[in-house]
Image (spheres, rainbow, N blue to C red):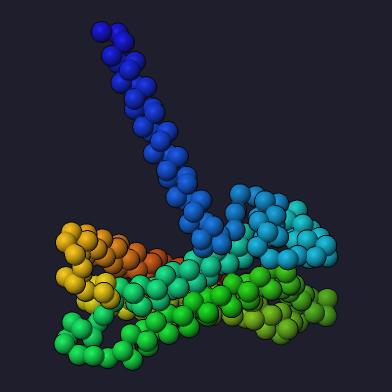
Amino acid sequence: MAAEPEHLLDSVTSRYAAGRNIFTRTLSFVRRSTFQIDKSSPAETIDSIGKEFPLDDAQRKTLNDLAVTKDGAAFIDEKAQAMNRAAFHRSAFALNAMVQLGFVDLAAQVSASLPQLKLALVAANLVIAAIAHFERRDNLQALLAGPNALPPRRRLWGLLPNPNYNRAVKKSSHPYAKSAWKENSLYRPAYFANAATIFLGGQFILPPERLIFPFGFILGKVAGLFTTLITMFDVWRGVKAGDDARLAREREVSVYRDLDI
């Protein structure tokens, strides 16, 4: 009798280990497929960036010098998050383009033949994926350039305000405003539009009823499950894009708190 609880504990432990192993492998696959940068510590983040992008010795030295300060480490982490977010958008919209091409026939649902509609949806996703790709490159360049150094707050021994200081503060808020606009006005509507079109027109391009039973039945069920998962994914990413936009707006507002008024 004493061996049964021990056997049950071993079984639960082994299943937990197996589940954790699957979860770890899934995260590793997602990280590789979306080119995510590891963000454990500033040094590991710099090493991960060096694996994704070619960095020369001067650029590595600049990043390592930034990492030793608290503000510099926060700046590296912020830009790494921005690059990861852009890389995820790029992979997500490339996936949506593939799904729109192979698993969506919106025109057939209304008994029409409009191949231009399919091509337009595929092209729109590829364009947005390209925008996310260049956004990732822009964040890398901003990281290598380092945080903007602000001029003195006041001049003439502190008697007069320095107008250049407020201009520099406002300029430092522009990346956050741009990021908020993209997340809220570009990525978010695009995710919801993909979710709607995939939900309404989701079917494999080759009609399953033309295949020999049971291949047609299996293909229809698999295609339906796949398009349902992609629809749920797009809805989740649309909601997440709204959260990212709010975070970018909060960072933009926090920059303006430093104005010398």
The picture places residue 68, in percent across and down from the top left corner, at 75, 53
The picture places residue 34, in percent across and down from the top left corner, at 51, 63
Give the residue at x 17% y 86%: 110
* Foreground of the two, 155 or 80: 80
234 vs 10: above or below? below
Describe residue 180's horizontal placement relative to residue 173 as left or right: left
* Foreground of the two, 238 or 229: 229
Give the residue at x 34% y 15%: 6
Quadrant location, the C terminus: bottom right
In the displayed image of the protein, which residue is found farthest to the top? 1
Give the residue at x 65% y 62%: 52
Which of the 4 image quarters holds residue 23? top left
Give the residue at x 81% y 60%: 61
Describe residue 209's horizontal placement relative to residue 13 as left or right: left
Q: Is residue 248 visible?
A: no
Which of the 4 image quarters holds residue 116? bottom left
